[in-house]
Image (cartoon, rainbow, N blue to C red):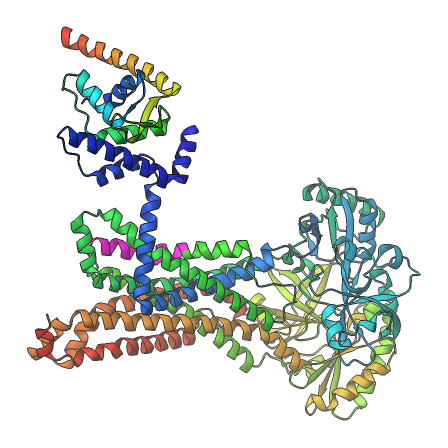
Amino acid sequence: MSELLRRLHYLLHRRRLDAELANDMEFHREMAARDGRRLGNTLRLREEAREAWGWMWIDRLAQDLRYAARLLRRSPGFTMAAVLTLAIGIGANVAAFGFFDLIVLRPLPVREPETLLRFTRHSPEAYASTLPYPAVAFYREHSRSLSAVLALDSGKLAMEGDQNRLDAHFVSANFFQELGAAPRLGRLLDPARDEPANAEPVVVLGHGFWQRRFGADPLVIGKTIRLNGKPAAVIGVASSDFSGLSLDEPDLWAPLTRQPYFVSGSHLLTDWSNDGSGVRMWGRLQPGQTSQAAEEELRALAAALRRQHPNVTWKDESLPSQPGGYATGSMTGTRRGTGPAPASELYPVAALIGTLVLLILAVSCSNLGSLLLARGVAREREIMVRVAVGAGRTRLIRQLFTESLLLALLGSLAGLALGYVVLRNMLALTGAPPWLDATPNGRVILFAIGVGFLAAILFGLMPAWQVARQRHRATLMRQILVGAQIAASCVLLIVAGLLVRALDHALSTHPGFEYQQVISIDPGLATHGYSPAQARTYLDTLQSRLRELPGIASVCLTSTPPLGNRMMVSRIEIDGRTISVHINRVTPPFFETMKIPLLRGRSLQPGDARSIIVSEPFARFHWPAENPLGKQFSTGVDAAGAPVNHTVVGVSGRERLVALKDPEAVEMYQLAQPADLASLVVLAKTSGPPEDVAAAVTRIARSGDPTIFPEVQLLKNSFRRKLRDAEGSALVVGLFGLISHLLACLGIVGVVAFAVSQRTKEIGIRMALGATPAHVLSVVLRHFSRPVVVGLALGVGGAAALSQLLRRELYGISHLDPVSYLAAVAAFAVTVAVAALLPARRALRVDPVNALRNE
Amino acid sequence: MPVGTLVLLILRVLRSGPLHGYAIAQRILTLSSDVLRVEEGSLYPALQRMLLKGWVSAEWGISETNRKVRFYQLTPEGRQQLETELSDYDRVNAAVQAVLRLA
């Protein structure tokens, strides 16, 4: 231990102690000279003496770094090209990791995010991400392990004078307090004042909404606004860096206990049923409690609840928790279904993006590696001199690698800057909330340096080894580098091609139903507590009024509006084979309104309680060789436990109404029953452009009940919205692919040009002996044909493997789609050929006389 | 100079009092009747190692030629190390002698 301290002491006082040693040896020399003896090389002796302290590597590193810096300064062109290439490769990785960090690793800006948990419902047969509000109240009252329980329900409210409906979050009154939020203006919700049932109705405005709609007016506090026709006082404005517990920014917050006030007739607060919308639940752990303890307690409470309300909780219901203080906790929005809960899609997507950005890094590094090898030739003399003076191979490699490390450090810094710019623009373009800050934190900076180090190893180590061995003329290394570049950018280009083609396919092919001229009207009767009889009256009136409107061709009802956000999926088992089916409860005019063809059988008729129409892929899956009409299967069990059998009466086409992307989605249609009426949506097909009739339709929709504010949408807008994601990802990956392709082509240009300049003499001799231009070209390019072919093959293989992860995003195109692959490979081959031929042409202009003269 | 004995010799020589580098070499040379010549290239590295290990410490002093130079002296750890090395050396020496005599 004290030895270490002595070493450190030496390190800190090196100069003084070395001078003292020099003095000692100088004195020794004088005395020895006096006695007639000669001393050896003092300098070397002093160095040997210094070695004992073990800090020589610092000196060597400093020396190498100084030399590397000098070298880089002397060739600014190379340095800039290298740093730029590295910046692109590292920057892409930094941007991707920065995004991942923001969404998954960084806690939301709330108080003590580590103690927040998001709870969802699970049982062996079903899952749901929301709970009935009375259940949440029960857990809040009886839980000992949670110090606070938060609830949230999102909804839409119509504000007087505003065309669009507002996004509102109804939250428990302790929401802002628990999250430690401070208001920008006024006050936020307070449990004491806003929780009681008779409290005055108040709202808190979101910061963005306050700026957009009220022009950041400070006098908005205390003003009354009318939401869904009901007055409410504005008590405050949230600050711009308040995130809530989710990634979406609502326009305003209101107390959950006042939701029935705004949404008249709503049963949210008293509805125990599993089909109601329910609320999202978070809890904060008591200090010292673990999430397992909380889950155990909630499981026991759920069992206790089941004894009191046997129909509303599931058997063996558990409430698993997820970290609530992170953005991932908000990603399970509102989902429910039977069977096991589907796995999170986050990690496959993250893995895919990670692989893509690593490919870009690979292209950058191979590019740079070839550059370094080329420079190795130019530094031949320097290396030879060093070897002659006594440098060992390890020393040389260490020095060359230090140069790569310095380059990598510069590249990391540039990549960090570039990644930050890219991420910030990406966040701005996708309309991310303002509290998502793209500024790199310690983790991102460390990641950038780590990636830089990895890049240094990738592009620097092998060339350093080759150059130190003075074997840089060997072509194998170069061929490997060229092949690697080609393979990596080929994969990116193919994947981009697949996404572009999928988008084109989605836009151009008919989804199996008519959407250009259909308007959907969603009155949301269920949230207003309409009974089936009331709903029937309302809907019948609405439909007959719409039919009277000129310009409307047909009207129908459905439970899941096409191209909407609602999905009902069930697993149906027939003869041992299970399939996931999208369920639609419709009225008979549905097929005519949506122009869905009926390939066999008949449409649904009033009174058809147990008849079903299935889509063609369903029929093909279960009854490939037989006539499906008349077949029976069960869709589940009724209250007594007996299977509910349905008969197939018709087969529709290949339409996919909601899950456009999923190639395996199949549809099933049943007649809407009275129980479904309150959740049905009206669809109206127009005979001309839907925009012409939209205003009249909205007027009619509002005329039914003044407390209801139906949402009117043109299906063609919904279609465009659905494709926005696909457009975004095609754009981004396309950009990646083009940039890496450009880098690869530049790399090839450089390598071929270099090869030409190296072999000028040989080319001169060949031309003097009468070689044809074609022969000369083939000689120059021969070395590169193999790596290009191997690279292309690897690229195609890699793309085929990678695109497996993309299958769900391809809108039905096979991930091995030959058109995309061929187009990408062809485009690639052509550009690579051009990139190689351009510098190779220079070989043809070699003057044999000059070439032979300049040895 | 047998390997490893240089440190032992320096420690022993310094037991009698602090000396500067040249004096240590001279003392060893004289006491061994010109047989054990300590090269400068081995003396100073050895002294640095002993400084690192804490067996000697260096203090400034004035030489006989009125020049400022560092004098090396034994530390208590150095004294202990000297005892250890002496006993080791005796043991090894006796063993070698035994083999040479009896083999």
Is A515 positioned to the left or the right of A44 in the image? right
Tell me the magenta residue range: A453-470
Residue A155 appears in the picture as rendered: yes
Towards the viewer: A246 or A113: A113
| Residue A43, percent from left and from top | 23, 41
Answer left or right for A411 relative to B48.
right
Outermost top residue: B102
In front here: A620 or A328? A328
Identify the image quadrant of residue A83. bottom left
- Asked if the stretch drawn in magenta spans residue A461, the answer is yes
Q: Quadrant of the C terminus of chain A?
A: bottom left
**A42 lies above or below A821:** above
Q: Magenta segment: does it hold A312?
A: no
**Apparent side of residue A28 relative to residue A564 in the rendered image (left or right):** left
Which part of the image, by quadrant, shows the N terminus of chain A? top left
Q: Can you see residue A673? A: no
Q: Is residue A572 placed above or below A47 in the rendered structure?
A: below
Magenta-colored segment: predominant secondary structure: helix
Q: Nearer the viewer, residue A580 or A435?
A: A435
Horizontal relation, residue A325 to residue B87: left or right: right
The residue drawn where x is 34% and y is 35% is A53
